[in-house]
Amino acid sequence: MDEIHLRLLKAIEANPQATQRELSESLGVSLGKANYCLKALVDKGWVKASNFRANPRKLAYATC
């Protein structure tokens, strides 16, 4: 496992609700690299990611 994968896992553990953009900023890597590494972790089954667009409760997140 690469160092970035380990750092990414630790960052997710610290903040499971973090977005890819937030993770990339906290790790100091590009958004593309964070996406690539996160996808690798999801493919290995080490991380479960949810898609906000597919969330049936997304209207609950709307602010007035």
Image: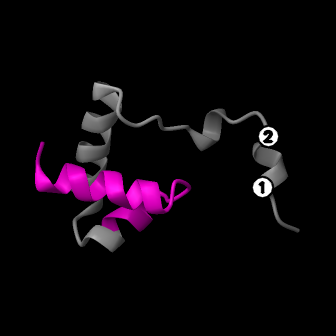
Residue at screen point 62% across, 39% down: 53
49 relative position to 30: left or right? right
Quarter of the image with the N terminus in it: top left
What secondary structure predominates along the stretch shown in magenta?
A: helix
* Outermost residue to the left: 2
Residue at screen point 56% across, 38% down: 51
Question: Against 60, is 53 above or below?
Answer: above
Question: Against 39, is 33 above or below?
Answer: below
Q: How many marks?
A: 2
Q: What amino acid does circle 1 point to?
A: Tyr
Callouts 1 and 2 close, C-beta under 8 Å: yes
* Outermost residue to the right: 64
Residue 57 location, quadrant: top right
Residue at screen point 34% across, 57% down: 10
Q: Which residue is under mark 2?
A: 57
Rendering colour mode:
one colour
Boundaries of the magenta span: 1-24
Q: What amino acid does circle 2 point to?
A: Arg
47 relative position to 51: left or right? left
Depth check: 31 or 18 in front?
18
